[in-house]
Amino acid sequence: MKTNFSMKRPIVVILALAFMFQSCSIYRANTVSLEEASEQQTKVKVRTNGDENLKFKRIEYVDHKFYGLTKKKGEWVKVELKEDEIKSIRPKNKGLSTFMNILMIGTLALMAPAIAFAAGGGI
């Protein structure tokens, strides 16, 4: 059975968008200290004094130093964080991130028939 590519295209686009939105993270507006961030053990967004945004899986406190854990090329990397070089630390808002991901996927699921109809040439 031969499948028409134009029929698969909307499905591929919808799945790609769904996967893209799954990785979205929403961070809280209020900032926390390094101590609080290390206790929370959650994703954080760190803004440095040089206006550079760094994202870490979590912040750890080891040997009287703070480290941000991030993954680069499949390897876990520890980046030392110095309190005097940090402008703000914003933790991930887990509840809102989950809600928005579900909302986006639900919206895409509801729009899927309309997208498929439009991509198929309509009436």
Image (tube, rainbow, N blue to C red):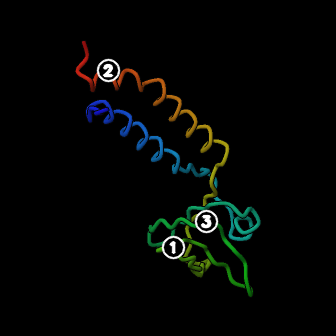
- How far is mark 2 from mark 3, CA to CA? 40 Å
Of all residues, the one furthest to the top in this rendering is 123
Q: Toward which corner of the image does residue 87 lie, by quadrant? A: bottom right
User: Relative to 12, is 83 on the left or the right?
Assistant: right
Is the C-beta separation of discs 2 and 3 under 8 Å? Answer: no
Amino acid type indicated by mark 1: Gly
Q: Foreground residue, 55 or 4?
A: 4
Tell whether 10 sits left or right of 58: left
Q: Residue furthest front?
A: 1
Q: Are marks 1 and 2 in contact (CB under 8 Å)?
A: no
Which numbered mark, 2 or 3, is in the foreground of this view? 2
Q: Secondary structure at mark 3?
A: loop
Position of the N terminus, as image quadrant, is: top left
The residue singled out by tag 1 in the image is: 74
Question: Could you tell which of marks 1 and 3 lies nearer the N-terminus?
Answer: 3
Q: Position of residue 55 (x, y in %)?
A: 53, 65
Quarter containing the C terminus = top left
Above or below residue 38? Residue 94 is above
First reached walking from the N terminus: tag 2 or tag 3: 3
Q: Residue 105, how many percent across, how many down?
A: 51, 35
Q: Which residue does the image show at 34% across and 33% down from the upper left?
A: 10
Determine which of the numbered discs, if any, sits on residue 57 in the image.
3
Q: Can you identify the residue that label 2 sits on? A: 117
User: How much space separates mark 1 and mark 3, taking CA atoms?
Assistant: 13 Å
* Residue at x 62%, y 60% (from the top left corner): 43
> Could you say where residue 122 lies in the image, as x and y percent from the top left?
25, 17
Q: Amino acid at mark 3?
A: Lys
Looking at the image, residue 38 lies above or below residue 65? above
User: Viewer-proximal residue, 48 or 79?
Assistant: 79
